[in-house]
Amino acid sequence: MGDAVSAQVPPVLWLGPADSSSELALARAWIADRAEVIDAASPAMAVANPPLAIRDRSPAAILLGSSAAISWSVRDCVMVSRRWPLAPLVSVAATLVEGRRRSGPALPGVEEVAWNELPGRLAWWLCDRAIGAPGTLGMPATARREERLLEVSRRVAEMRPRQPARVEVAATRAIDAEAVADLVAAAGHAVVGRRVGKPPIDHTADAVVWDAGDLEAPQITWTGLLAANRPDAAIILLDSFPRADTAAAAARSGASAVLSRPASLESLAGILLGVSPRPAGSRG
C-alpha cells in the first residue's frame, strides 16, 4: 500500500518565484517536508544551468507556479519537457487562475492543481512513484478529467492502508458530514465519529476532517483548541473558498491542511497518508 514511501526524499523542480503570490508561497512551504524543492526562476535558466540535484536525473515533477493565467506558454513547457522528458508537468494555480479549470487546462498536456490541493496530491503522486506505479500523472497527456478521476478512484481503492487512521468527521450540515465520511471511507480509513457542528475537543481519533463551510476566525480559534488538546492528531479543514491569509492562520493554529470543499479524493487521501494511527492502548 501507500505506506511504502521511499526513504529518499525525491526532488521536484519549482519554476517561477514562489513569493509572487502568497498562495504559491504557502503551497511551496507546505510541500517542503514531502519533497526536496528545487527553485528556478524560469525554464530557460533551469535548462541552461540545471541545479545539481537534477543535473543527472529527472525530477519527480516539474511544478509551474502560476499566479496569473498567462504565466507560462507552450514554448516554456516544451523547453523543460525536452530537458526532462520523464518528468510530469503540473501547473500550481493561484486563486486568480484556479477558476479556469472549469473549462479545462489552458496548457495542453499539463495537469492543473489548485494551490491548496498541491500537498495532498503531491503526497499521493510520490507514493505511487515510490512503488513504481504510474498513477494519475502517468496517464497520457490527452486523458480527459473524467478519466483521471476514475483512475484516482481505482488507485485509492487498490492502495488500502495496512493500518487505517481513526477519523472524526464534522460539518455544519448533516448531509455534508455524511459526504465527508464517505470520502474518508473511500480513502480506506475508519470513521469513528460524525458531528453536525464543531468537532469535539475531547475526541480520541488520529485525525479530524472538519467541513467548516466558510473558514473564519471562530473556526480558526476552535482549531487552536483542538490542536492544543490533541497535538498529535491531524486536523484537516475544508473551506468553501480557501484564501492564503485564512489558510496561513489555520496552519498557525495547528491545522495540517486546508482543502477546498468539496475536497477531491486524491487530495484528502494524500493528506491522510501522513497520519500515523496511535496504538490502541494509547487512546483515551
Image (cartoon, rainbow, N blue to C red):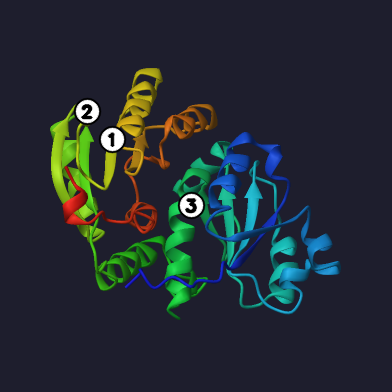
In this view of the protein, which residue sits in the foreground, 275 or 262? 275
Residue position for label 3:
119
For the question of whether residue 214 can be seen, the reply is: no
Query: Does 225 sit above or below residue 281?
Result: above
Q: Write down the residue under mark 1.
A: 211
Q: Kindly give the residue lying farthest to the right in the view shown.
A: 48
Tag 1 or tag 2, which sits nearer the N-term? 2
> If the image is split into quadrants, where does the C terminus sit?
top left
**What is the crowding at mark 2: few (fewer than 14 residues within 10 Å), some, or many (at least 20)?**
some
Q: Which mark sits nearer the N-terminus, 3 or 1?
A: 3
Q: What residue is drawn where x is 74% and y is 61%?
A: 76
Of residue 144 and residue 39, the one placed in the foreground of this image is: 39
Q: Distance between the residues labelled 2 and 1?
A: 7 Å
Residue 266, image x and y in percent?
Answer: 36, 58
Which amino acid, by three-letter code, is at mark 2? Thr
Disc 3 and disc 1 in contact, CB within 8 angstroms: no
Give the secondary structure at mark 1.
strand
Residue 6 position in % (x across, y down): 48, 73
Residue tagged by mark 2?
172
Check disc 1 and give the amino acid type.
Asp
Q: What element carries label 2?
A: loop
**Quadrant housing residue 235:** top left
Q: Could you tell me how far apart the alpha carbons at marks 3 and 2 are, in whole angstroms?
A: 25 Å
